[in-house]
Amino acid sequence: MTILYLLIPLGLLLLAIGVAAFFWATRSGQFDDLDSPAWSVVLDDDRSPGKRRRDARADPRSGGPDDEEPPP
């Protein structure tokens, strides 16, 4: 029963730290825009995947299969 004298204040302290961290994150703008960072990965390139593949084959610096010399 005496352990409750330690656990209740410790629990309240942890709760206070959690609430303070939440309000700090809210004030510092952590929750302002949750959707844009996720969409930036999807909308990263201007070219389509098919065009990128064709460009890589045509580019001699790409190290693709066109760089290899045909066997004699």
Image (tube, rainbow, N blue to C red):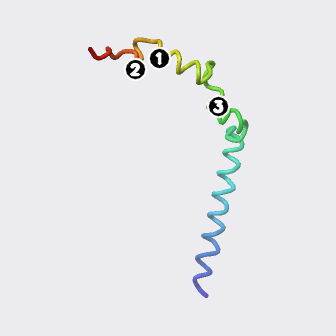
**How many numbered circles are shown?**
3
Q: Is residue 63 left or right of residue 55?
A: left
Q: Quadrant of residue 6?
A: bottom right
Give the labeled residue for mark 1: 57
Residue at (55, 20) in percent of width and height: 52
Cα distance in 3D space between marks 2 and 3:
28 Å
Cα distance in 3D space between marks 1 and 3:
24 Å
Expressed as whole percent of the image width and height from the top left, the position of residue 64 reads: 41, 20
Q: Is residue 33 above or below residue 58?
A: below
Q: Determine which of the numbered discs, if any, sits on residue 42 in the image.
A: 3
Expressed as whole percent of the image width and height from the top left, the position of residue 24 reads: 67, 46
First along the sequence among labels 1 and 3: 3
Give the labeled residue for mark 2: 65
SS at badge 2: helix
Q: Is residue 2 above or below residue 41?
A: below
Residue at (59, 22) in percent of width and height: 50
Q: Amino acid at mark 2?
A: Pro
Q: Is residue 5 left or right of residue 65?
A: right
Q: Is residue 60 left or right of residue 26?
A: left
Expressed as whole percent of the image width and height from the top left, the position of residue 49 reads: 59, 24
Q: Amino acid at mark 1?
A: Arg
- Residues at discs 2 and 1 in contact (Cβ within 8 Å): yes
First along the sequence among labels 2 and 1: 1
First along the sequence among labels 2 and 3: 3
- Residues at discs 2 and 3 in contact (Cβ within 8 Å): no
Q: Is residue 55 left or right of residue 12?
A: left
Q: Quadrant of residue 1?
A: bottom right
